[in-house]
Image (spheres, rainbow, N blue to C red):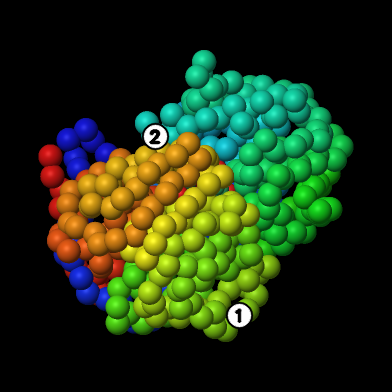
Amino acid sequence: MSLTENLVFHVQPGGCLKGTFRVPGDKSISHRSIMLGSLAEGITHITGFLEGEDSLATLEAFQSLGVSIKGPVNSEVTIEGVGMHGLKAPDAPLDLGNSGTSMRLLSGLLAGQGLDITLVGDSSLSGRPMRRVTEPLRLMGAQVETTGQGTAPLVIHPVKRLKAINYELPVASAQIKSCLLLAGLYAEGETTVSEPAPTRDHTERMLNGFGYRVRRDANRISVSGGGKLTACDIDVPADISSAAFFLVGATISPGSDIVLEHVGINPTRDGVINILRLMGADIEILNRRDVGGEPVADLRVRSAPLHGIDIPEDQVPLAIDEFPALFIAAACAEGVTRLTGAEELRVKESDRIQVMADGLAILGADVTPTPDGIVIQGGPLAGGRVNSHGDHRIAMSFAMAALRAQGEIVIDDCSNVNTSFPGFIGLARDAGLTISASEEN
Ligand SMILES: O=C(O)C1=C[C@@H](OP(=O)(O)O)[C@@H](O)[C@H](O)C1
Ligand SMILES: C=C(OP(=O)(O)O)C(=O)O
């Protein structure tokens, strides 16, 4: 986004959501499909790929690393895998835009390639913590430098070989886990990562799908270096993190009745359903099925009155990206909702605790941010002008809040909605939200 451009959402108050529709493909799975497809032997064909800026940044990075990738056309991508050792040094730094997943997973995947590579990102990504990946990578013998503040650019220098480590994750993070498992593919010996709590396991599932053995023993996940990946077809389910806006929107707006089709409901991602149900939401899980190693279902959601809860801490990593939307649900619930154990929210695309607290306060909600969470007292929401601080999930969450607000909600700095949810405005409008967007200076 240029300095003067400001994509502004205008959302009229009231209404409800109706219809049957499918939100775009899962961002986490889309990233991983490009990474593993590129390193595989053979042709990988992907359907349902997310054509959002984040997953496209990963796709373009692998094109710059010499991989022939066709698409996306109608969300289909075809990759001619180059094998584990077929990547080429890029001509320029790889620009990963706003995408933390791209940068952290690539730092591990590229650390053992024997190539000089620099990873850069936009101003948000350049402020996010990277030592969480570079420190354990250094223990593996990698040379990956950060700035003095521990941030991007990441400069990767070639090393002869990586060695396996046994690493206890200091935070429940699928990005750190995946970074180290991907580096482990290139390490001598068996790399083991222990997680303090379960986090999304798409990397492990997809490695299995590409024929690479991953061992899980309680909270310990291990891979041995030196194997190979065999190409396969991947059908990416709809992203539960994008579905979350509609789960909340339909729940809070009386008269709503929607079906969200083909949503990934992996048990390491379903915290948003569990938390909303604990608050009283009416969400039915229909047609459960398995698609390429990932559980998928259609979700029927009807409006229901919500009550505040203490959010169980074991649900936090399972709903980590859905808290902006869940805070809107809490603001519309009767009583108090308390979130604890979620300090990771402060280092996402924005400080999601502070930015949501500021926006909710503008709408008249009674909110108290804490170092690791927030306390929200439900009540009526007024209209007002809030700032998403360039964070896609904040922008879409406040758009849904208008369904229960008493006046128009205007949301600044929304262009990054395209990182995870291209077509959000059209889909939301078709479902019943009165939303428009304009460029302002
Ligand atoms: O591995 C992934 O695809 C992701 C992991 C999560 O990050 P952390 O591992 O930093 O919690 C999540 O917030 C992000 O949107 C996607
Ligand atoms: C945190 C997110 O993504 P990333 O870390 O990949 O930027 C997100 O999509 O909410």
Q: Out of 299 and 205, give the one closest to the viewer.
A: 299
Q: Which residue is mark 1?
A: 288
Measured as percent of width and height from the top left, residue 336 is found at 41, 57
279 vs 374: above or below: below
Residue 345, position as x, y percentages in the image? 48, 43
Residue under the point 25% across and 67% down: 404
Sequence-earlier tag: 1 or 2: 2
Determine which residue is flagged by label 2.
Answer: 124
The image quarter containing residue 187 is top right
Residue situated furthest right in the rendering: 189
Q: Does residue 132 lie above or below 307 as drawn?
A: above
* Visible residue check, residue 34: no
Q: Amino acid at mark 1?
A: Arg
**Left/right of residue 340 with respect to residue 40 in the rendered view:** left
Residue 139 vs residue 274, the one in the foreground: 274
The residue carrying pointer 1 sits among few (fewer than 14), some (14 to 19) or many (20 or more) residues within 10 Å by Cα, namely: some
Q: CA gap, disc 1 to disc 2?
A: 37 Å
Disc 2 marks a residue whose amino acid type is Ser
Is the shortest distance between ligand 1 and the CB of mark 1 under 8 Å? no
Q: Nearer the viewer, residue 219 or 255?
A: 255
For the C terminus, the image quarter is: top left
From this viewpoint, is residue 335 visible? yes
CB under 8 Å between callouts 1 and 2?
A: no
Secondary structure at numbered mark 2: loop
Residue placed at 27% from the left, 76% from the top? 16
Position of residue 2 measured from the top left corner of the image (x, y, whole percent): 23, 35
Q: Residue at x 39, y 34 (%)?
A: 124
| Quadrant of the frame with the N terminus | top left
Query: Vertically, is 214 above or below 302?
Result: above
Bin the neighbour count of mark 2 within 10 Å (Cα to Cα): few under 14, some 14-19, many 20 and up.
Answer: some
